């Protein structure tokens, strides 16, 4: 069972690293937006970073595989790799499942 947005003390800050408009990247963006809209409402900030346009940011965050989602806040930082198609795994990684 998922926590409700009102149970979240600090707004979620998410950063999704992708490689341009590749099919896997587009799928990850769509899946993540669907999950966030369904489970978080408007209680999150999502930044989408194309590593081709911002390679230094990807290097700073030690991006090792793509697509990769970083949950920046609340701490601890979590990393999820893949197309975000496994809703339960994504929610667990975001700390939103029991």
Image (spheres, rainbow, N blue to C red):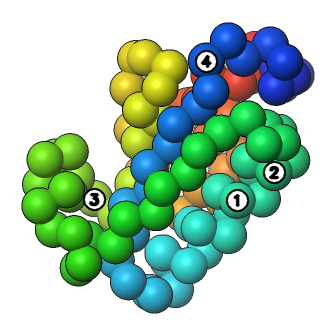
79 shown above or below 75: below
Check disc 2: other Cα within 10 Å, few if <14, some if 14-19, many if 20+.
Answer: few
Horizontal side of 53 relative to 20 (left or right) equals: left
Residue found at x 20% / y 57%: 58
Label 3 element class:
loop
Q: Distance from label 4 to label 3 (Cα)?
A: 27 Å
Q: Sequence order check: which comes first, mark 1 or mark 3?
A: 1
Quadrant in which the N terminus is drawn: top right
Q: Label 3 near label 4: C-beta < 8 Å?
A: no
Q: Sequence order check: which comes first, mark 4 or mark 2?
A: 4
The residue pinned by badge 1 equals 33
Q: Looking at this view, is 97 or 50 the one in front?
A: 50
Look at discs 4 and 2 and give the one toward the viewer.
4
Horizontal side of 1 relative to 31 (left or right) equals: right
Residue 87 x/y as whole percent:
72, 46
* Mark sitting on residue 37: 2
Residue found at x 46% / y 63%: 48
Q: Sequence order check: which comes first, mark 4 or mark 3?
A: 4
Label 4 element class:
loop
Q: Label 1 near label 2: C-beta < 8 Å?
A: yes
* Mark sitting on residue 65: 3
């Amino acid at each position: 069972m998922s926590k409700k947005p009102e149970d979240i003390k600090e707004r979620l800050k998410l950063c999704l690293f992708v490689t341009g408009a590749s099919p896997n990247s587009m799928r990850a963006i769509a899946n993540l937006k669907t999950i966030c809209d369904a489970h978080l409402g408007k209680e999150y900030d999502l930044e989408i970073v194309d590593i081709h346009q911002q390679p230094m940011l990807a290097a700073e965050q030690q991006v090792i595989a793509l697509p990769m989602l970083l949950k920046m806040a609340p701490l601890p930082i979590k990393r999820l790799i893949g197309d975000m198609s496994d809703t339960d795994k994504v929610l667990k990684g975001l700390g939103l499942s029991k």
